[in-house]
Image (cartoon, grey):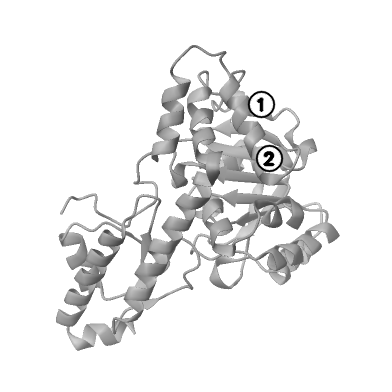
Amino acid sequence: MSQFEQFASDNYSGVCPQAWKAMEAANAMPEPAYGEDSWTLRAADSLRALFDADCEVYFVFNGTAANSLALASIGQSFHSVICHELAHIETDECGGPEYASNGSKLLLGEGADGKLTPDSIEHLVTKRTDIHYPKPKALSLTQATEVGTVYTPEELKAIKSVADTHRLNIHMDGARFANAVAALDVHPSEITWKAGVDVLCFSGTKNGLAMGEAVVFFNRALAEDFEWRCKQAGQLASKMRYISAPWCGLLENDVWLENARHANACAERLASGLAGIPGVSLRYPRQANGLFVTMPDSVQEALRARGWRFYNFIGGAARLMCSWATTHERVDQFLADVRELMAQCPADQILRTA
């Protein structure tokens, strides 16, 4: 088996055909630089149509830049951002949000299944209000979360109520936003601006693009001078059409949504298969395109020896991610290997992971 037959990350997958074709079309003739091209205009208009909103749209290279610059546009260095303790901006962005804002602090909240709760937000906002403490200015919600769960429209509206009370803007880290939309089967507006989200960082990389994230400001006032932030941070692509054109391919005919539905369905197939194997369990509910699996360390090592790749997060659980390119055949082959190895696993090791 190839070393890349894996479930490590949806970042491993290649470019989907529709995005590749659009980038090839953008290469057919010269276009103006720095986002003044027809492809960037078309992609931005397509996103406005998708969300049914007159929003400001910008394209950057990657998710860390998208989140960091978006959060920096909300507050100043003496402000703070409330996020879940497992949020990507806290655990995996090397202090990027703090760096981009010249020091704005992240305040870590709690909540089951990777989701912030209104009570946790209320606690952090009211914990201290003196001038010696960084003033809460924003919330950051991850959709889908770092543990593969999703915020429902009702949960988002409850959070919005707390945010309104304390005059907090809402940022959404949408690294897997497409998978959340597919899982909830809602219009994208229902879990963004209609639920109070001010700015969304919408990932294309994890859903079929080579690179490129869209920063979508539903609250247009927050977008003031954002293009200068992008330029200063090295995120203004000179040949912007090679970032924006693939978005056109992804958005046309709802390819983005079909890609996400396929990834979610593969994860559901994987979860269903694992559920029938004694000694294997899910750490969190499977709701989008990822699942966190508890199984013996020896079985995980044996799976890696057979060429499977996956990461261990959240207390040693094996994170299994599916993408637009995952196949049912690969899912079934992985399940067959897990069944075989678990059948060979000593009973005492299985009991330790139960």
Task: Say the numbered circle drawn on residue 227.
Answer: 1
Image-based side of 31 in relation to 215, left or right: left
Q: Nearer the viewer, residue 29 or 341?
A: 29
**What residue is shown at x 45% (from left), y 50% (from top)?**
259
Task: Determine whether label 1 and label 2 are within 8 Å by CB.
Answer: no
Quadrant that contains the C terminus: bottom left
Q: Local crowd at mark 1 within 10 Å, few (<14), some, or many (≥20)?
A: some
Task: Say the numbered circle drawn on residue 49.
Answer: 2
Image-based side of 170 in relation to 62, left or right: right
Q: Secondary structure at mark 1?
A: helix
Counting from the top left corner in percent of width and height, residue 249 is at 49, 35
Counting from the top left corner in percent of width and height, residue 106 is at 63, 53
Task: Say the numbered circle drawn on residue 169.
Answer: none
Counting from the top left corner in percent of width and height, residue 119 is at 72, 71
Q: Amino acid at mark 2?
A: Ala
Q: Amino acid at mark 1?
A: Glu
Counting from the top left corner in percent of width and height, residue 17 is at 39, 38
Residue 103 at least partly seen? no
**What residue is shown at x 57% (from left), y 73% (from top)?**
112
Quadrant that contains the N terminus: bottom left
Q: CA distance from mark 1 to mark 2?
A: 22 Å
Q: Secondary structure at mark 2?
A: helix
Pointer 1 or 2: first along the chain: 2
Q: Nearer the viewer, mark 1 or mark 2?
A: 2
